[in-house]
């Protein structure tokens, strides 16, 4: 409401702007380009929720182009930044917040692309510098303060809408006991399970795609399409991630830490003895160093490859002090160093005999990295020899399960795109595992075409275990949990990751923060979570779980559902024009009235003087005897 008051006259004028409706928002958004919405095919929850999100946005006239993509195509589009909005998720412990945020430096990271056009004076480069600085902060109080600044910095840009906390769910046949919750996403401790009767177990695990498709090359030193859960069964690291974030011994039984005079830090790892790889090769420092030689070779330490997190960036040297003692030095104090060594990839250890050219494989001419990485030529880095990737010759680690076989196939889509799949994969329990025993003889991973098939297999007993998020729709899990079926047990873990909607500032119309805020306020995530996720997860407000270190921050503004605000934002430019026009009209009226009043005052003053003049004249005439 605009009010013009001429207080000195006791006169007021007012005009009222009408309420903006969703119909007005639809009209205001008519010229806004369509928003490209990427959805991962096979993620049961994402597929269910996409329809709800699209409906919310279409209600205010935003046009949505949904693309349901295979895992490879989905990853490629996100890496190239050719999307508008996309479901995403944090990585959970042990990655959050430090490694998840530091990975934004990589040009093929979806968040890197999403931060391309932050609203000035903020910028992606400034945000990345802030993250780089906090990772080297040893003082815990200063570190926490710097993280608070970072959280506010990205939050205010309206690039990420936190939706719900992701929980790892397991549905198991009652013949299976020994369930224990994993401590990070894709950590399914199947080795703890105790089957009654038949010692062979079938499983449908949660994968990067939601439903399982393939284990990929099962290579410990590269990434997609390799699956975390399978790598975690076959390969081990120096340390592992335990309850409440405690770093526990694994292939290293203990370690020492010494600060160096040059500002760096030296870690000495005392390796576990009497451990063998699945092929019988001894685990020792020579095997450890060979793996590190390959992971840290030349250009592989760049952000596009392994340098997305801190260890490859800050590692200075690594060497063997003796047969069972590994020394690693980093160039600066880096507080998450041990925590990052717990990651499922890329620092997990492969048998020396399983490298492409065996135990003499050169890290530059026959690196263990995925051969496709160098299909266009070796990886170059100034001052370092070029790296040629030759992959691995076998899938051999030290973990609780060894790879046995796979039934591979190729799916051809309607447009003749081919996707490699595994109908099933068989693993064998490692009877000689140092942290055994394993009570499972053979573990069979089975691929299903859809969630309905998985649910049916659980109900008829042909599938023993479903373990992971996004495999079954949440409502299906709730139905199983609340049914009278005594043959199935449901286990629901704590929140490990947060699911979010990523808004890409690098593509129109989301390069406009007004449109990003409109999208955010138009989505009723509370209703969405209640309707589609079965009621066993909760809406969230922060990117990272507030239970994580340096993440307990109250972020404002709150990105809540507010349809009125979304509608007003939709028509903000038009309202501004109308307001300016209204102000101009008010000014004109005010000036007109003002000048009119001034004129009346002038006339009044003139008349007053005229009357006074006439009185004076009469007095003059009377006193001087002059006739008129």
Image (cartoon, grey):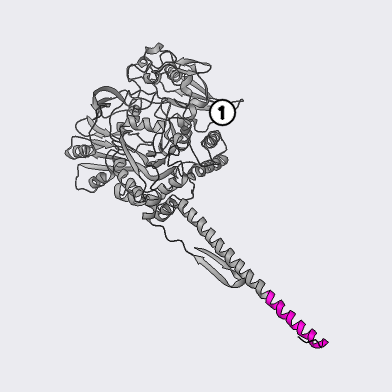
Front-lying residue, 600 or 194: 600
Can residue 409 be found in the magenta stretch?
A: no
The residue furthest left is 460
139 lies left or right of 545: right
> Helix, strand or loop at disc 1?
loop
Residue 69 in view here: yes
Can residue 606 be found in the magenta stretch?
A: yes
Is the residue marked by circle 1 packed among few (<14), some (14-19), or many (20+) residues within 10 Å?
Answer: some
**Prevailing secondary structure of the magenta residues:** helix
Residue placed under numbered mark 1 in the picture: 332
Residue 424 in view here: no
Q: Quadrant of the C terminus?
A: bottom right
Front-lying residue, 618 or 544: 618
The residue furthest front is 627
- Quarter location, residue 362: top left
Front-lying residue, 372 or 397: 372
Please, is residue 217 above or below residue 170 in the view?
A: above
How far across and down, in percent of the image, does residue 424 sit? 23, 27
How far across and down, in percent of the image, does residue 279 sit? 32, 17
511 lies left or right of 175: right
Q: Which residues are magenta?
A: 605-628
Please, is residue 12 above or below residue 285 in the view?
A: below
Residue plotted at (72% across, 77% down): 609
How far across and down, in percent of the image, does residue 32 sit? 40, 45
- Quarter location, residue 66: top left
How far across and down, in percent of the image, does residue 520 sit? 41, 47
Front-lying residue, 329 or 567: 567
């Amino acid at each position: 409401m605009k009010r013009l008051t001429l207080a000195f006259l006791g006169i007021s004028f007012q005009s009222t702007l009408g309420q903006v409706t969703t119909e007005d928002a639809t009209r205001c958004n008519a010229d806004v380009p369509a928003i490209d919405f990427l959805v991962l095919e096979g993620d049961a929850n994402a597929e269910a929720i996409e329809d709800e999100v699209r409906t919310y946005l279409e209600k205010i006239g935003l046009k949505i182009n949904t693309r349901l993509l295979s895992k490879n195509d989905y990853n490629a589009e996100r890496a190239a930044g050719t999307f508008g909005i996309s479901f995403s998720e944090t990585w959970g412990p042990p990655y959050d917040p430090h490694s998840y945020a530091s990975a934004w430096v990589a040009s093929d990271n979806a968040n890197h692309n999403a931060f391309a056009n932050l609203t000035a004076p903020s910028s992606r480069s400034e945000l990345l510098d802030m993250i780089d600085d906090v990772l080297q902060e040893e003082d815990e109080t200063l570190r926490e303060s710097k993280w608070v600044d970072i959280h506010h910095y990205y939050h205010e840009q309206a690039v990420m809408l936190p939706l719900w906390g992701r929980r790892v769910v397991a549905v198991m046949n009652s013949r299976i006991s020994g369930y224990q919750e994993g401590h990070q996403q894709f950590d399914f401790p199947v080795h703890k399970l105790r089957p009654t009767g038949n010692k062979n177990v079938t499983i449908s695990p949660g994968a990067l795609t939601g439903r399982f498709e393939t284990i990929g090359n099962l290579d410990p030193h590269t990434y997609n399409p390799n699956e975390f859960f399978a790598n975690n069964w076959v390969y081990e690291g120096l340390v592992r991630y335990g309850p409440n974030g405690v770093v526990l011994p694994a292939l290293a039984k203990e370690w020492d830490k010494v600060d160096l005079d040059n500002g760096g830090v030296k870690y000495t790892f005392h390796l576990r003895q009497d451990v063998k790889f699945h092929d019988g090769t001894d685990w020792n420092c020579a095997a450890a160093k060979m793996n590190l030689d390959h992971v840290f070779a030349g250009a592989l330490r760049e952000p596009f490859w392994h340098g997305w997190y801190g260890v490859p960036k800050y590692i200075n040297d690594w060497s063997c002090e003796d047969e069972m003692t590994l020394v690693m030095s980093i160039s600066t104090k880096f507080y998450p160093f041990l925590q990052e060594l717990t990651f499922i990839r890329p620092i997990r250890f492969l048998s020396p005999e399983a490298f492409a050219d065996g135990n003499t494989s050169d890290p530059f001419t026959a690196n263990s990295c995925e051969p496709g990485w160098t299909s266009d030529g070796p990886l170059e880095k100034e001052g370092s020899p070029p790296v040629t990737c030759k992959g691995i010759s076998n899938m051999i680690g030290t973990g609780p399960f060894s790879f046995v076989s796979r039934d591979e196939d190729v799916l051809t889509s309607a447009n003749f795109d081919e996707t490699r799949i595994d109908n099933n994969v068989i693993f064998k329990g490692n009877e000689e595992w140092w942290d055994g025993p394993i009570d499972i003889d053979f573990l069979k991973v089975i691929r299903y075409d859809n969630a309905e098939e998985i649910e049916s297999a659980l109900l008829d007993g042909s599938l023993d275990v479903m373990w992971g998020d996004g495999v079954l729709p949440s409502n299906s899990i709730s139905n199983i949990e609340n049914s009278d079926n005594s043959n199935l047990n449901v286990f629901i873990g704590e929140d490990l990751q947060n699911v979010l909607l990523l808004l890409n500032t690098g593509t129109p119309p989301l390069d406009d923060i007004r449109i990003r805020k409109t999208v955010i306020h138009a989505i009723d995530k509370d209703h969405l979570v209640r309707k589609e996720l079965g009621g066993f997860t909760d809406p969230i407000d922060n990117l990272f779980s507030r239970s994580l270190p340096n993440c307990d921050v109250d972020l404002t503004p709150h990105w809540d559902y507010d349809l009125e605000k979304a509608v007003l934002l939709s028509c903000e430019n038009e309202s501004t024009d109308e307001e300016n026009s209204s102000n101009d009209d008010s000014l004109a009226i005010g000036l007109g009235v003002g000048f009119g009043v001034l004129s009346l005052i002038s006339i009044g003053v003139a008349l007053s003087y005229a009357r006074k003049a006439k009185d004076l004249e009469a007095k003059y005439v009377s006193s001087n005897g002059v006739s008129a």
